[in-house]
Structures are given as C-alpha cells and as structure tokens.
Image: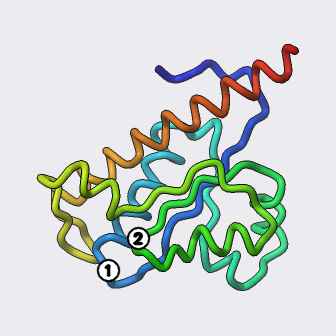
Amino acid sequence: MKPRKETNLKVVIVPCSGIGKAFGSVSREAAYIITEDLRPEYTDLVALAKLVMGEASAVAKVSGNPAITIDGCKLACASKMVEESGGKIAQAFDVLDVYRRYKDFRPEGIAVLNENGIRLAEALADEASICIDNLATKSKEGRNA
C-alpha cells in the first residue's frame, strides 16, 4: 500500500548503466517504473554516469538522501559509486538475485526488453517500492516523535 505524502523524504534511485546488457536494461527500466509510476513523490533518479563524472548536483542528492541501488551484475558499480560519493545505501538490489526469484521472467533484448524483461523490471520495482514505503514510514514516525 502506497503511503500518503506526509514527509519530505526523497529516496535516490541509482540504476546500473550496463549498456548493451539485458540485466542493465532491466535495472534502468525498474528505476523508471519506480520514479515515474510507482513512487514519483518519494524518489529522484540519479544516473550512474553523473556520479562517475562527479557532477555536484548528483553527488549532493546521493550524499543527502537514502539511496536504493539497482545493479545489473556482480561488479555492483551503482552501489560502489553511491558509497564513493558519500551516500548511504538503504537497500541494494541485484537484478540477478531478483531474477533467481522470478526464473520465468528471463529478460532478452537490449535497446528494447522482451515482455519477460519488463515483467522482471516490474517485480523488482515492486520490491523496491516496499523498501521506499518502509523508509517513508520511518521518516514520518521520526518527525512525529
């Protein structure tokens, strides 16, 4: 259940930039679903490339807000860059781990994901939304304390 907006919480979503890889595409699609459809009022999308380049506004968002990272492989570039940028990871997702729970959703495609790739991204986005809801509830409770 989506919480009512009663907090100034912004969770930064940092997806993988694994261009040319299906799991990287799933990562980015999940990030778009979260930030545009499921929890736009609680989230900000930060491109991994902006952190790599040290863009001041991206680093400020990451260092000043809880982050959810979505990594497309075990190199965990999104998670590493959030930490290197002074950010605190509230939850790190690995597309491969999510795929293990949803083996029927085998992603294919790079520029355009197949239906199963979209379904895997939706499942990941749903899991991340639960984390965002929990962070929003904690933030609201902390404000009321």
- Residue 118: image x %, image y %? 25, 55
**Label 2 Cα crowd, 10 Å radius (few <14 / some 14-19 / many 20+):** many
Along the line of sight, which residue is nearer the eye, 113 or 126? 126
Q: Position of residue 90 (x, y in %)?
A: 64, 48
| Amino acid type, mark 2 | Gly
Q: Name the N-terminal-most of marks 1 and 2.
A: 1
Q: Residue at x 57, y 40 (%)?
A: 40
Q: Please state the horizontal and vertical placement of residue 54, each as a whole percent of the image.
A: 78, 81
- When asked about the image quadrant of residue 83, the answer is bottom right
From the image, tell me which residue sits under label 2: 72
Q: Is residue 123 left or right of residue 72?
A: left
**Above-or-below relation of 24 to 7:** below
Q: Dot 1, how many residues are within 10 Å of its Cα: few (below 14), some (14-19), or many (20+)?
A: some
Say which quadrant the C terminus sits in: top right
Label 1 is placed on what type of residue? Lys
* Residue with the mark numbered 1: 21
Q: Say which element carries label 2.
A: loop
